[in-house]
Amino acid sequence: MTDVVRKDVKQRLEDGDYSCAKELTLSMFSGKWKIVILFHLGTDGAYRFNQLMRLLPKASHKVLTNQLREMEEDQLISRKVISDSQVQVFYEITELGRTLMPIINQMYEWGTKRIKQLQVTPTFNINEDEAKK
């Protein structure tokens, strides 16, 4: 199913009743795996579908397929089919998708710092606990 935020934004754009730049930007990321996919395509380069499945083991085949289709439709990624002896499909970030990388990288940096802040410092050392016995 198409993400609700993206679907709403798309409809309002088509109706000419849309002016919220923040919500439009958010709608490009809406979906559980899109930011992660864009991050890896923008950082590592092209991926095949099965490589993305291995990268995101908790993503179902259907969800990953839908999110790739939506990002292709939004022109954030491209799907390239190479027909040799075996058909190969690669997903790559587009120039438009690349323009989101500074935002994604900032989100990654913020998240990394926040995770460090949230980590609980142990109040005892396991070796000290053993010594008390």
Image (cartoon, rainbow, N blue to C red):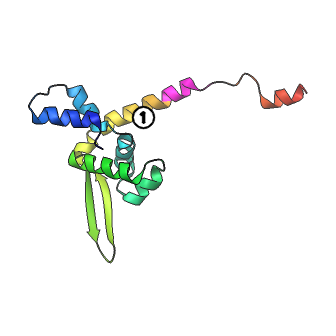
Image quadrant in which you'd find residue 47: bottom left
Secondary structure of the magenta portion, mostly?
A: helix
Up/down of 38 relative to 118, above or below = below
Q: Residue 120: x, y in percent?
A: 63, 24
Q: Amino acid at mark 1?
A: Tyr
Q: Residue at x 59, y 26 (%)?
A: 119
Q: Residue 67: x, y in percent?
A: 32, 47
Q: Residue at x 33, y 67 (%)?
A: 88
In the picture of the structure, the residue carrying the numbered disc 1 is 108
Q: Which residues are magenta?
A: 113-120
Q: Residue at x 30, y 53 (%)?
A: 92
Quarter that holds the N terminus = top left
Q: Residue at x 25, y 32 (%)?
A: 25
Q: Residue 19: x, y in percent?
A: 14, 25
Up/down of 114 relative to 44, above or below = above
Image-based side of 131 in relation to 125, left or right: right
Q: Residue 116: x, y in percent?
A: 55, 28
* Nearer to us in this view, 109 or 71: 71
Query: What is the residue that sits farthest to the left in this orientation?
Result: 16
